[in-house]
Amino acid sequence: MRKFLAVGHHGPVDPRLGLRIAAEAVDWITARLADGTFDGLYSMAGGGRLIVANADSEEELLALLRAAPDAEREWTFTELFDGIEVIRKYVDSMRT
């Protein structure tokens, strides 16, 4: 399983649609946090969302996010790595 930073932005959302999907989104997000699919989810000013997620691929994560009860967003993904492990490997590589 790989870890990704997913950043999504959407344009204006009709308030009636926003109210309808908000309750569904809370339940859906809570389930993804509980099952370990998401490590964390944050909202950003201006309608953005930032998620630290676990998935086998960007394609799998994109499909999951597109199926979510949420406003349609444009997503970008960055793969994340354990920072301490990266530093340890760097130090080891410099010693040899």
Image (cartoon, helix red, strand yellow):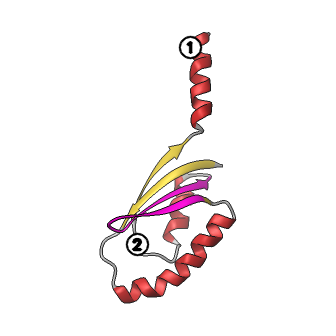
**What mark, if any, has residue 94 been given in the picture?**
1
- Residue sitting nearer the eye, 16 or 74: 16
In the picture, measured across the screen, residue 84 lies left or right of residue 62, that is right
Which kind of residue does numbered mark 1 sit on?
Met
Furthest residue in direction right, as rendered: 35
Mark 2, Cα crowd under 10 Å, few <14 / some 14-19 / many 20+, is: some
Instruction: Give the image location of residue 55, x and y in percent.
Output: 61, 54
The residue lying at 52 percent from left, 73 percent from top is 68
Instruction: Give the image location of residue 79, x and y in percent.
Output: 52, 45
The residue lying at 54 percent from left, 43 percent from top is 80
Q: Magenta residues?
A: 39-55
Confirm whether the magenta stretch covers residue 42. Answer: yes
Which kind of residue does numbered mark 2 sit on?
Glu
* Residue 1 to residue 26: above or below: above
Instruction: Give the image location of residue 57, x and y in percent.
Output: 57, 52
Mark 1, Cα crowd under 10 Å, few <14 / some 14-19 / many 20+, is: few
Confirm whether the magenta stretch covers residue 71. Answer: no
Dominant SS of magenta comes to: strand
**What mark, if any, has residue 72 been given in the picture?**
2
Instruction: Give the image location of residue 28, x and y in percent.
Output: 59, 75
The residue lying at 67 percent from left, 60 percent from top is 36
Q: Quadrant of the C terminus?
A: top right
Q: Nearer the viewer, mark 1 or mark 2?
A: 1
In the picture, measured across the screen, residue 59 lies left or right of residue 74, that is right
Q: SS for tag 2?
A: loop
* Residue 41 to residue 83: above or below: below
* Residue 6 to residue 14: above or below: above
